[in-house]
Each structure stands twice: as C-alpha cells, then as structure tokens.
Image (cartoon, rainbow, N blue to C red):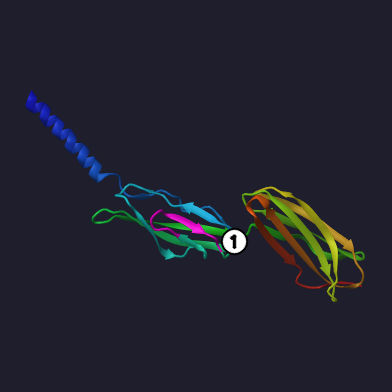
C-alpha cells in the first residue's frame, strides 16, 4: 500500500514537471490590422504573444513600419510619431528563449491618416457677382477639438476677401457633410483658399488642413 502511494505521488510530480516544461506553443495573439496612427501625433500599440519560453524578442523581418515609428524588441511595443501618410505593411517575428528557440511570424498593417481632412463638397464657382461653394470636414482624432475655418478669395494683386468663417467645437471621430461659403466680389481673378485649424488645449496640440482651387475664377 505504501509503495503504491509513493509511486502515485512520483507519477503526479513527474506529470506536473512534464507539463510545466512543455508548456503551450508559442503564438502571436495580436490581430493583423493595428490601430490607425495620426500624422505627427504620438502613437503607441503593443504586440502580444503567449506560450513558448519567456523572455520573448520581437523584430520586423519584412516590409517597414511607418516612418517615425519603431518596434521595441523586448516589449513588442510599436511607438513614435509618424511622419508620412499611407498604408504600411510589414511582417514581425517573435522568438522565445527555448533551446532551440521557437519563432512565429505574422503580417501587420498600420494606416497613417490626417488628423483633419477638408474636401470640396461643391467646387467654388462664379455666381452672380461673386463666388460660392462648400466643403466637408472630418475630425479623425480621438479628441474633441476647438476648430476655426476661414475661406478667402485672393485676387491677382494679393488682396484677400473673406468668403466664410466658422468657429466651433468639433467632436472626435465625426464628420460634417457640408459647410457652405460665398460672398459677392469685385471684378478680378481669384484663387480660393480654405484653412482649418483645430486645437486640443489640454494637450497643447494643434492640427491643420488646407485646400485651394487649382485654377483662377474670373469675375467680370
């Protein structure tokens, strides 16, 4: 009876030792599409893995991160301030500390987008004695911003005439489908400029966006 009990205890200890040594297989658990990054704004996201023998190390093995971002090999954190817009594809490998080491790879994508976008909703056009049009705006950040928008028509001599002015709180992750502008103007040849400034006072951050017509508009 005593021998049977000792044998059972030994088997239990060995089984536990075996499970502890083998452990779970190494696996990257972060999905391939990572959070979007805002141009010229701080960015941070962490890649995660499970299983294998810690510590683990991370490396980019194909493609490239957005300019301005870097991968920390020890923590798996991607951080920095992106300096270029675009969609960036890259492959990452995580390696554990087993002997021999085990490794897994996965492809990832980060989109770097503008904090603000301003586009023509209705292209500026000559009306009866003036110019009118409209724009649409998007706040792609996670912050409510204090937004100021001014639209001016600049003639051939460099004189500016105000076509529109707006100042309001622009909610995070929201769009405004149309903001009209327009005014009567003296005779001349005009380029229309739209300037948008969005401030996040508590973070001391300012975002900007600009738009202008490609060809002069003639008022006779």
Is 170 placed left or right of 191 in the picture? Answer: left
Q: Which residues are magenta?
A: 71-82
Crowd tier of the residue under label 1, counting other residues whose Cα lies within 10 Å: few below 14, some 14–19, many 20 or above:
some
Is 172 placed left or right of 77 in the picture? Answer: right
Q: Nearer the viewer, residue 77 or 89?
A: 77
Is 172 placed above or below 88 here?
above
Find residue 176 and report its horizontal and vertical position in percent: 73, 51
Q: Nearer the viewer, residue 173 or 79?
A: 79
| Displayed quadrant of residue 198 | bottom right
Q: Nearer the viewer, residue 67 or 104?
A: 67
Q: Is residue 138 magenta?
A: no
Most extreme residue toward the bottom, as rendered?
Answer: 157
Q: Which residue is mark 1?
A: 40
The residue at the point 71 percent across, 55 percent down is: 137
The residue at the point 53 percent across, 52 percent down is: 35
Find residue 63 and report its horizontal and vertical position in percent: 45, 65
Res. 33 in view: no
The residue at the point 57 percent across, 60 percent down is: 112
Is 41 placed left or right of 219 in the picture? Answer: left
Count of picture labels: 1
Find residue 42 and report its horizontal and vertical position in percent: 56, 57
Is 119 placed left or right of 81 in the picture? Answer: right
The quadrant the N terminus occupies is: top left
Is 209 placed above or below 17 here?
below
The residue at the point 7 percent across, 27 percent down is: 3
Find residue 9 and report its horizontal and vertical position in percent: 15, 31
Most extreme residue toward the top, as rendered?
Answer: 1
Q: Is residue 81 magenta?
A: yes
The quadrant the C terminus occupies is: bottom right
């Amino acid at each position: 009876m005593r021998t049977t009990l000792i044998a059972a205890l030994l088997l239990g200890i060995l089984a536990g030792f075996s499970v502890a040594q083998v452990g779970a297989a190494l696996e990257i658990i972060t999905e391939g599409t990572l959070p979007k990054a805002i141009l010229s704004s701080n960015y941070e996201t962490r890649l995660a893995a499970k299983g294998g023998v810690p510590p683990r190390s991370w490396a980019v093995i194909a493609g490239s991160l957005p300019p301005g971002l870097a991968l920390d090999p020890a923590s798996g954190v991607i951080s920095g301030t992106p300096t270029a817009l675009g969609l960036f594809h890259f492959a990452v490998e995580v390696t554990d500390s087993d002997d021999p080491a085990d490794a897994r790879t996965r492809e990832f994508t980060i989109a770097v987008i503008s904090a603000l976008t301003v586009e023509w909703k209705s292209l500026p056009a000559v009306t009866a004695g003036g110019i009118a049009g409209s724009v649409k705006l998007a706040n792609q950040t996670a912050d409510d911003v204090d937004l100021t928008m001014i639209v001016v028509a600049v003639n051939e001599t460099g004189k500016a005439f105000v076509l529109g002015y707006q100042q309001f709180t622009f909610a995070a992750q929201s769009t405004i489908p149309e903001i009209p502008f327009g005014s009567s103007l003296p005779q001349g040849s005009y380029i229309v400029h739209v300037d948008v400034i969005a401030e996040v006072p508590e973070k001391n951050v300012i975002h900007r966006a600009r738009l202008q017509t490609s060809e002069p508009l003639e008022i006779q």
